[in-house]
Amino acid sequence: MMRFNFLEDFLALVFPQTCSGCKTSLYAFEFQLCRKCEASLPITSYHLRPKENDLTVKLLGLTKADRVLAFLRFSKNGLSQKLLHQLKYKNKPQLGVVLGKLYGQKLIQAEFDVNWDFIIAVPLHPAKLRRRGYNQSAKFAMGISAALAVPVHEGLQRTKFTQTQTKKSRMERWENVKNVFHFGGKELEGKYVLLVDDVMTTGATLAACANALLAAGVKKVDLAVIAAGTV
């Protein structure tokens, strides 16, 4: 055990763990985020008005989601954008888990009505999943699941590889994704699920996923993302 601890200390000295937000070295009791960045997270209050906020307005006419939430407020060049970039492009899957746990704890503290049967992440196309190595939204789902003790369900599938949504208009985004998700089983009939993604802009991808779940017999779908705003 002493030899193992010595090796750990040596590796930490040579390859110090740094904060995903500010790049400062982390203490042994910190993981992915330093305490300063964790305290500086731009946490939203969508959980206080989940059925009537600017995110629900974006989804009007696209889907019949019940409640729409976001953990962080997205701001260009802000902390939330830095964390999303680290999560998606810098091979930091555990950052998604950490953010999910923090959000789950926030919902518990706010006494939010957590009555979901399952948590489902927006799926990546298999080709993109192989290239990245993990689904960042699934990591967020895992963190929420750990905090709330709600199981993750992985049955939702992305059946078509789509072009990037960047620089597309709201309607172009919708046309790009409206028929690419599918759920083939019947085990979600009558269930209440939380559908999660990393970021919400127009809401087209989330709406398409929600519609696929509702078509499979899901009773209610709530939506939650790591960050939302003008991306």
Image: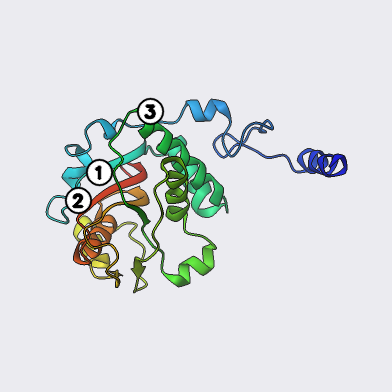
Q: Which residue is mark 2?
A: 65
In-front residue for pair 19/100: 100
Q: CA distance from mark 2 to mark 3?
A: 24 Å
Seen from the viewer's position, the closer of residues 181 and 227 is 181
- Residue found at the far left of this picture: 61
Q: Are marks 1 and 2 in contact (CB under 8 Å)?
A: yes
Q: Residues within 10 Å of mark 3 (few under 14, many from 20)?
A: few
Kind of residue sitting beneath label 2: Ala
Residue on which the image places disc 3 = 109
The crowd level at tag 1 (other Cα within 10 Å; few <14, some 14-19, many 20+) is many
**Nearer mark to the viewer, of 2 and 3:** 3
Q: Is residue 11 left or right of residue 189?
A: right
Precedes in sequence: disc 1 or disc 3: 1
The nearer-to-camera label among 1 and 3 is 3
Against 34, residue 158 (above or below) is below
N-term mark: 2 or 3: 2
Instruction: Indicate the amino acid at tag 3.
Output: Gln
